[in-house]
């Protein structure tokens, strides 16, 4: 019985890692909208829809091969949301005001910060492993 439970748990764990879908992320720069998946591949061919408060479509367009969409004209009606839908059922929605403000780079978006943190983690884990594998002896040395 315990072997069966362990086997079923292992299969369920492995299946959950297979069905994990990566996210769809938006960033803006001026009148350009950049859309990419969490693995940093561009969301080329994704459908961009700009809607108002009532959900009425104001603009509908397609992202280019680099995952970039440029606003060609300012809409007459006040837009409320930008919705991006990519293949595989990926969907994300951002408010128009957030898109106009633009997204600034966060602290962890800089490569040097990621490299520095990676080195710190590797060095720290190395010292911890060394400490765990070489415990100090409690037996006194013979004279």
Image (cartoon, rainbow, N blue to C red):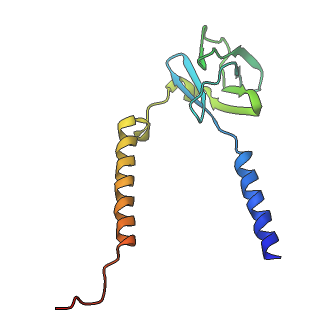
Q: Residue at x 74, y 61 (%)?
A: 10
| Mark count | 0
Foreground of the two, 2 or 32: 2
Identify the residue at image location x=21%, y=91%. Answer: 142
For image coordinates 68% across by 15% down, the residue present is 77
Q: Is 32 in front, or is 121?
A: 121
| Residue farthest top in this picture | 73
Residue 120 left/right relative to 65: left
Q: Position of residue 127 (x, y in %)?
A: 34, 63
Q: 84 left or right of 99? A: right
Give the percent coordinates (x, y) of residue 20: 70, 45
Q: Quadrant of residue 26?
A: top right
> For the point 54% across and 23% down, which residue is it?
100
Q: Out of 85 and 94, give the one closest to the viewer.
A: 85
Compared to 70, does 128 lie above or below?
A: below
Q: As displayed, is residue 5 above or below residue 85?
A: below
Give the position of the C terminus as an image quadrant. bottom left
Picture layout, residue 69 above or below residue 3: above
């Amino acid at each position: 019985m315990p072997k069966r439970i362990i086997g079923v748990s292992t299969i369920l764990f492995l299946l959950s890692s297979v069905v994990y879908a990566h996210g769809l992320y938006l960033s803006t720069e001026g009148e350009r909208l950049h859309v990419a998946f969490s693995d940093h591949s561009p969301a080329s061919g994704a459908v961009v829809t700009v809607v108002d408060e009532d959900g009425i479509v104001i603009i509908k367009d397609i992202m280019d091969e680099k995952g970039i969409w440029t606003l060609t004209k300012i809409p007459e009606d006040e837009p409320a949301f930008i919705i991006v839908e990519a293949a595989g059922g990926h969907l994300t929605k951002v408010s128009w005001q957030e898109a106009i403000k633009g997204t600034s780079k966060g602290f962890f978006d800089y490569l040097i910060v990621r490299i520095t943190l990676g080195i710190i983690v590797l060095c720290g884990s190395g010292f911890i492993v060394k400490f765990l594998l070489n415990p100090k002896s409690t037996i006194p040395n013979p004279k």
